Image (spheres, rainbow, N blue to C red):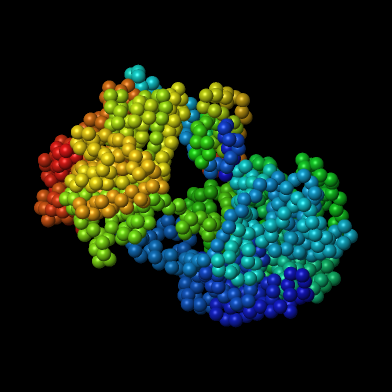
Amino acid sequence: MKSINLKENQFIQFHQKISFKFDGVKYFGYKGDTIASALLRNNINLVGRSFKYHRPRGIYTCGIEEPNALVQIISEYSEPNTRATIKKIYEGMEIESQNRWPSLENDFGSINNLFSPIFTAGFYYKTFMGPHKKFWKNLYEPLIRRAAGLGKPPKDFKGVSNHIHHNVDVTIIGGGLNGLLAAKSLINSNYDVLLIDYEEQLGGIINNSNKISLIDNKEPKDWLKETIQEIEDSKNIKILKNTLVTTYNYVNHLIAIEDRFVGSKPIEGKVNSTLHKIRTGHTILCNGHIERFLSFQNNDLPGIMLSSSFEKYMCRYGLAPSKEPVIFSNNSNSNSLVYSLIKAGLKPKAYIDSRSGEEIEPNLFDLIRKNDVPLYTNSQIKGAFGNKKIEKILVEDSSGALNEIKCDCLCLSGGINPDVHLFTQSKGLLDWDEKDLTYKPSKPFQPTITLGSASGQFNFDNLNSDINEKLKTFKVKKLDVKLELNTNTKYHIEKLWEVSPQKKSLWAKSFIDLQNDVTTKDIRQAITEGFDRIEHLKRYTTNSMGTDQGKISSINALGIVSDLLDKKVNEVGTTIYRPPYAPLSFSAIAGRNCYEFYDPERKSPIHSWHLKNGAIFEDVGQWKRPWYFQINKDESMHDAVQRESKNVRENAGILDGSTLGKIEIKGEDALEFMNLIYTNSFTKMRQGSARYALMLGEDGMVKDDGIICKISDQHFIATTTTGGAATVLGCMEEYAQTEWPNLKVFMNSITEQYATFNISGPKAREIMKKAFPNINFSNEEFPFMTFQFHEFNGIPIRILRASFTGELGYEIYIPSNSAPKIWDNIQSFGKEFGLAPYGTEAMHLLRAEKGYIIVGQDTDGSITPIDLGLSWMIGKSKKDFLGKRSLTRSDTIREDRKQLVGIIPSNKADKLEEGQHIILDKEIKSPVPMLGHITSCYYSSTLGHDFALAVIKNGHSMIGTKAYASTSSMSTTGVDIVKPVFYDEDNKRLVS
Amino acid sequence: MLIINCPYCGPRDQSEFSNGGEAHVKRPDGSKEIGDREWGEYVFIRANPKGLFYERWVHTHGCRKWFNCVRDTSTDEILVTYKLDEKKPNLNNFKSVVKTPSGEPEVGSGNFTVEK
């Protein structure tokens, strides 16, 4: 294809040369060029290989609808699947073609084309099923992934994206003739208006074609300049250029993406795209139309493009991709291309129309005759042929004779469709227009107005009356614009979806979806196999499922299906258009919510001390908790955890428990409320005492646990698990508001207001005495499960005697701001007693030795308190509490429920693992009945061997028996099922 | 993204709210004998109509108040929101679109696969 440069215009500057690289070779383009227009200028049309068959593909369009020309932008973090027809070039840009190896010219994958008869519809579903399911994962999938596909993922991405919210009265989408006229009529009205266009220059059809000769007796370009100036000067209209509306949600919520670096390289660290989230009163859709292609044999050869795209290259980019293209059309939309070519001193090599001579517009007929263009009426192209580019076509003329025409470019027009994507995303209804052979917007679901060709008005006759009628609700002054046209534009089309090939062969392909390599044969086959519903057919053949969503072809597919099924197109229906309209990068969606802002990190008031003292952190919800403390770099996690836990058992340890959820409950009816929320009864509990409590869901399953401190019948403080704090508060609020609104009770989170330190170990009392000399810590004065309020150096503190380790323990609650000081104090007083910090892992080990559960680890939402052996915690005399009735459901009183037990290896040297299944037989012979699994498992230096907690069927009655734990290597380990307590069974250490 | 009219705060973005499922489901009185079926239905069974639906929402990132609404599940349109202690509105007051905008039949979804 030999292209020539035409006249310069305001969009393209021939004096500003730009160099760029395509597949490593340096080329020149001009400022204003897209990648596609620059490549065409350099006579390059082979730009990629197709998805499945690796067929050579060229530039098919000149805009957002491009199915083929997708490239990888190496100079922008290797951004894949960029539309070459939109992306502007800049100095030093590096571009690579996609889906080819080793090179675009000689692509190994094109061998697929030879095997194409087997790569038909449903290929993946039918093949690769055997001989073993492992083959899919290890062989087929990696092979297919390498061979099929588009670009490669970006590398070292450093782009930044912002989000901006707008709240406006009217949003006009599309800045073409109708969009500008709508905006013009809203100038200086009382409405806040956004005018959005995805191009850098407003104007649409005025810039892209020679259809219009005069507007209000002015040159279209002059009128455009004046109108844009007027809109820019208005107070109430904001224009967003380079912005593509991708999504039209419910309640007129639009999402649009703005490219901030058009025609220049994105600067690292600067915002390269902005995501606009727009809430608007009315949406005016002026997003125009998209031309369709036509299906015939080899309609994918490089050198074939849409006729309106050819004209756009001429009008906007001053470039004729070919000096003498052949035009093939079934409608009047390609008239203006003939006009544009002749105006530019060029001439079509031939004009082929499927319509009869009488149907062709008279002024087109005259133009063709006057310029001696060979005209074929009632004719069709039977096929295009050539090696990696179009070289000749076969035309069947009205007499049925075949004519061979040599050519380097073929322009197609299969008719035009209103761009209904956004309209249908808004849930508007479409209607099939039998005359114009396309779906058109009919009933909007939201306050949506469609204007111009987006509404299916393909003629300009009713331009003024249509706009005036539809904008009536805004009560703005009426428009009276006079248009004069270069070509007759009464839209006329004759039905033609597909031309059947000259010779039927297994290898002859006429494509219906270029991006996904779907042929018309695939459509036929799918229907034969019973996939005749359009949504099934789409998924079975992958038609219109590419990144272009079949913009130039999906209506053709509906036409072909309707013919095959002998139904009307509106009976076939249409698949649902889903957002986004065009691909949107994840980085734009993420915006600033990435890296450290992806999810907030919550840190305890002691966090900086942990950092300085070798803490290795663990994420618990959003919290950073010390997992274990390394005393030196060489200490392994195992050694650290054993050292920490041993120290707690022998001396004392201190744990930062500030992340525990804390909820304060107050009010006249607080006692009754707590009795309803938790399983325990708090009625007889003394003031100043504490109780371990369980919270259930209404299904009777354990939801959370914690310690409840009763300050009075009107005042409680509850702790929750670190991860469950928000849920528990939410649950309390829900029931207080929805079920028991008569109870006078209020609750609030005080998690972040108080730090919590847990001092635990046989020497804990000594340390506490030293740190708080004014407090009597004797067993009589300060018994187990009681708490006291004190003041320490003017700081109010609460001390609770409780334990999660099985040792004598105290929990100190301190206002967060004063916490670091007291933490340091305790550290220094505790030194002589061997006090050392311990992390969550040692805590988990210690509590498991004691058989204390962790909700969410030893329970999974299917475990009742009875299953845990915690029936004693159920206030049976209480009339009601959350989930009470569920504890006597037939399912919850089943005997073979999974119940909590302890597990130790029969041979003490054996190792156990979390997640291991407990089974009855030593030999693994499938199917193996599963008894249950290990929920927590540790090595205990106190016991000298591994031990575990597990939930197994009917576990309580199996205590004292033997079973087996299956290993990942298909063998088993003998285990003893024991009571889930491994240390200090009679609680002597806790209470003394 | 919906706009939800919180009865306490006014219209706010959907992202501030959480859905709480069917509204006006009465919790059986715990002080009385409750049959297995009655309790089971309360815990596990909820209506899932296509069309008008009483629904609970909570203004999680706002006033944290629970309230009720009538939503058309076929269009997502929220027709009215009201406080918990207000009487539930009669559904006959609202016109249900029922047929979804994509033109599906009243029962099922997809393309005319289910005949009513």
Position of the N terminus of chain A by quadrant? bottom right
Can residue A937 be seen at all in this image of the molecule?
no
- Residue at the outermost top position: B32
Where residue A918 appears, as percent x and y from the top left, is 19, 47
Where residue A881 appears, as percent x and y from the top left, is 34, 27
Can residue A331 be seen at all in this image of the molecule?
yes
The residue positioned 54% from the left and 64% from the top of the image is A159
Left or right: A473, with A484 as reference point: left
Q: Which of A3 and A990 is in front in this view?
A: A990
The residue positioned 53% from the left and 67% from the top of the image is A79
Position of the C terminus of chain A by quadrant? top left
Where residue A457 appears, as percent x and y from the top left, is 75, 51
Q: Nearer the viewer, residue A279 or A785?
A: A785
Classify residue B91 by image quadrant. top right
Where residue A758 appears, as percent x and y from the top left, is 28, 45
The residue positioned 75% from the left and 50% from the top of the image is A236
Left or right: A605, with A899 as reference point: right
Left or right: B110, with A711 as reference point: right
The residue positioned 61% from the left and 25% from the top of the image is B93
Image mark count: 0
Q: Nearer the viewer, residue A716 or A361?
A: A716
- Residue at the outermost right position: A217
